[in-house]
C-alpha cells in the first residue's frame, strides 16, 4: 500500500500534469504551432523592418547627394554673382564711362551681371527639382507590405 501510495501519491500530481499535457496531444501541436507561427512572424517582421530601414538609408543618401549638388550650384551662383559684381563692375564702369557716361555704364553692367546671376540660379533650381519625392521607393514598399498584411494569402 505504501508502494502504491508513494507511487500514486508521488506520481499522481506529476502524472496528472504530464498526463494532461500528453492527454491533450491535439492541443500541444496547436500550442507549438502557434509558437512557430509567432516565431516566424517575428523573424519575418524583423527582416522586413531591417530591409525597409536599409532601403530608406539608401534613398536618403542618394537624395542628399543630389540636393547637395543643387545647393552647391545655388551657392556658387550667389558667390559668383557677388564677386563678379564687386570686382568687375568697377572696372567695366570705368572703361565704359569714358565712352557713354558713368551712369549709363553702371546701369548696363548691373543688368548684365543680374542676368548672369539669374541664369546660374535657374540652373541650381533645375538641379534641385530633379530630386524625387522623399523616400519614394520605401513608401511604395511599405504600402505593398501593408496590403500583404491585410491579405497575406493573396
Image (cartoon, grey):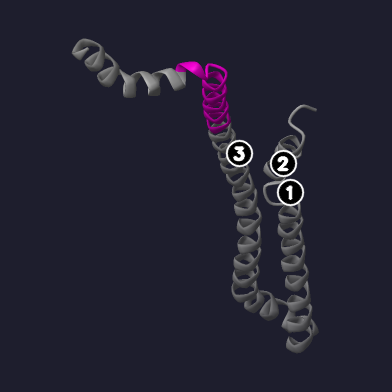
What numbered label is drawn on residue 52? 3
- Chain-order first, disc 2 or disc 1: 1
Main SS, magenta region, reads: helix
Q: Position of residue 28 (x, y in %)?
A: 51, 20
| Foreground residue among 148 and 143 | 148
Give whichever of 88, 49 is nearer the camera: 49
State how far apart marks 2 and 1 are (Cα).
23 Å
Label 2 crowd bin: few (<14), some (14–19), many (20+), radius 10 Å: few
Q: Name the side, left or right, on which 69 lies relative to 132.
A: left
Helix, strand or loop for disc 3: helix
Front: mark 2 or 1:
2
Image quadrant containing the C terminus: top right
Instruction: Point out the image quarter for the N terminus.
Output: top left
Which residue was labeled with disc 1? 132
Q: Are marks 2 and 1 in contact (CB under 8 Å)?
A: no
Mark 1 burial class by Cα count in 10 Å: few <14, some 14-19, many 20+: few
Residue at the farthest front position: 1
Q: Which residue is mark 2?
A: 146
Question: Which residues, given as a range, are shown in magenta?
Answer: 22-43
Rendering quarter of residue 79 = bottom right
Question: In the picture shown, does residue 117 fall above or below 53?
Answer: below
Residue at (55% x, 18% y) in the render: 29
Tag 2, which secondary structure? helix
Q: Residue at x 66, y 55 (%)?
A: 70
Q: Which one is in front in this view, the residue at disc 3 or the one at disc 2?
A: 2
Q: Residue at (76%, 81%) from the top-left corner?
A: 105
Mark toward the start of the polypeptide (3 vs 2): 3
Amino acid at each position: 500500500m505504501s508502494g502504491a501510495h508513494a507511487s500514486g501519491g508521488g506520481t499522481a500530481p506529476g502524472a496528472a500534469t504530464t498526463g494532461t499535457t500528453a492527454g491533450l496531444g491535439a492541443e500541444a501541436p496547436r500550442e507549438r504551432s502557434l509558437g512557430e507561427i509567432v516565431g516566424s512572424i517575428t523573424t519575418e517582421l524583423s527582416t522586413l523592418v531591417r530591409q525597409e530601414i536599409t532601403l530608406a538609408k539608401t534613398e536618403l543618401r542618394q537624395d542628399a547627394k543630389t540636393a547637395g549638388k543643387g545647393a552647391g550650384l545655388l551657392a556658387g551662383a550667389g558667390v559668383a554673382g557677388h564677386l563678379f559684381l564687386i570686382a568687375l563692375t568697377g572696372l567695366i564702369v570705368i572703361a565704359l564711362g569714358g565712352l557713354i557716361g558713368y551712369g549709363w555704364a553702371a546701369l548696363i553692367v548691373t543688368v548684365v551681371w543680374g542676368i548672369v546671376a539669374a541664369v546660374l540660379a535657374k540652373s541650381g533650381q533645375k538641379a534641385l527639382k530633379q530630386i524625387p519625392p522623399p523616400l519614394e521607393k520605401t513608401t511604395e514598399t511599405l504600402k505593398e507590405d501593408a496590403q500583404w498584411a491585410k491579405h497575406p494569402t493573396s
